[in-house]
Amino acid sequence: MMTGILTGRSSSSDELELHPDDVVTVRALDALAPQYWGIEPMDKLTAQTAARVTAILACLRFLAQSISCMPLEILHAGDRHKRPATDLACYPVLRRQPNGWMSTHQYLETTVYHTGLYGNAYSLIRSGKRGFCSELIPLHPSRMVVKRMSDNTLKYNYINPFGGQEEYAQEQIVHYRWLSDNGYMGMMPADLCGTSVSLARKLDIAASAYWDNAARPDIVLETTEKIPEEGKQALINGWRDAYGGPRNRGKAAVLPKSVTAKVLDGNSMESSQYMAQRSSIVGEIARIYGVPSTLIGDTTAMKWSTVEQEFISAQVFCLLPWQHRIESAIDISILGTYGPDVYSKLDNRGLLRADTATRSQLFQTLFNLGAITPNEIREIEDLPLLDEPAADLTYLQLGFSTLKQAAAQGQPAPLNPATTPPDAPGIPQKLPSDGPGQPFIGGPDDAIVA
């Protein structure tokens, strides 16, 4: 029955018995785990064959590696402060090691790869010594069948690698989805854009078949005289030795008598058209995944004047939706058990890290505004923290004032003789006079002589 298909051995139609009520469908059995890719026809459009297209693999690699490089933070949201949720039993599972053989980086990389290739990714929430979420076990999406029940819950039926079937409730599965038209199953990108993916795959197959079966020379040596077989082989070897290889390119050709060299222009034109077609496929595949084509090796479509602006564009329009896709699945399936104030956050600051001069300017501005402490700056730069208590304090420049206060400071304050001290600086203690007991009377331009 199922064993023949799972092991890759051919099975007759009589051996494969599928009941209409069985959750195992022919399509599910037709797209099993990657170890059985060898039995897939090369021209058949499936997730496995789509991954063999270099542009698709480059997009998946960019998405998987970018998201997995972001540290996954589990936080408590307070009224004014947020802090790491180290008190939760599942914190080390999500933060460091989801299971016994994977790190968080590897887990996120596999999850994003499955989601981008199959449209769905699944992880089994396994209970243990850490509580209900002691492990997260990735399940291959090609082995999963999802059903929506009459009470609007989901039922997951999984074909394990040993051929048995397992059924899981919605609470036992973390389900990551790509674009969906029914709300509970993500669609496979290769199916939605099958024309572009199929064309890219056929170009690869055609190139392989051309060089294997129908390769044509670029130059033909013609002669009007009859040459014996030994002479033909000697002529070919002599031409190859004299003009073949990169070091002999462009050398002047000296031909024997009655021999002419004819270049097959059709070959070069066909090769140019083939390369142009392959280059256009890169942009088509990049648009499917929303990845800037220059980030997957397309040097013909430079869109930004600086690399920083290109990275910001990729972060906002490509990686940010993937961040929310991963965070929301973890929040709903796992962290929702602990209440609404616990949430997950993928920290993308590492991908947006600017150059040294720009970072210094940012830290200086935040420090002057009292928004960051010296130790927080050192923590961001991955430097050891200072033990001085002053390094954990914020500082604010006090030289700022409003225009009204600045105008008031420019006017001298009226003096009150009753409150002015007798030795106040700038206040004359004795009035000069013209004579004993007479006050000084003079104009504004008269000088006072001591």
Image (cartoon, helix red, strand yellow):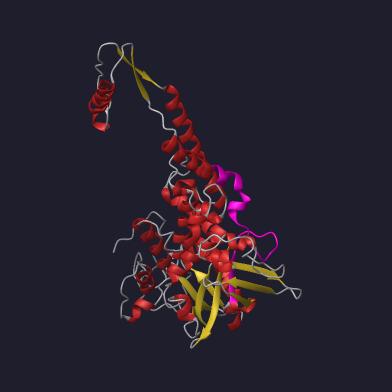
Of 165 and 311, which appears nearest the observer? 165
Of 384 and 130, which appears nearest the observer? 130
Q: Magenta span has 382? A: no
From the image, which quarter does the C terminus lie in? bottom left
Residue at x 61%, y 63% (from the top left corner): 28
Q: Is residue 217 visible?
A: yes
Of 171 and 426, which appears nearest the observer? 171
Of 430 and 364, which appears nearest the observer? 364
In the displayed orientation, state which residue is furthest to the right: 150
Task: Estimate the x, y position of residue 315 in percent, counting from the top left.
Answer: 50, 57
Image-based side of 172 in relation to 33, left or right: right
Task: Estimate the x, y position of residue 156 in percent, counting from the top left.
Answer: 63, 73
Q: Is residue 30 above or below residue 394?
A: above
Magenta extent: 173-199
In the displayed orientation, state which residue is furthest to the bottom: 129
Q: Is residue 224 above or below residue 93?
A: above
Residue at x 57%, y 61% (from the top left corner): 11
From the image, which quarter does the N terminus lie in? bottom right
Q: Is residue 437 visible?
A: no
When asked about the image quadrant of residue 95, the answer is bottom left
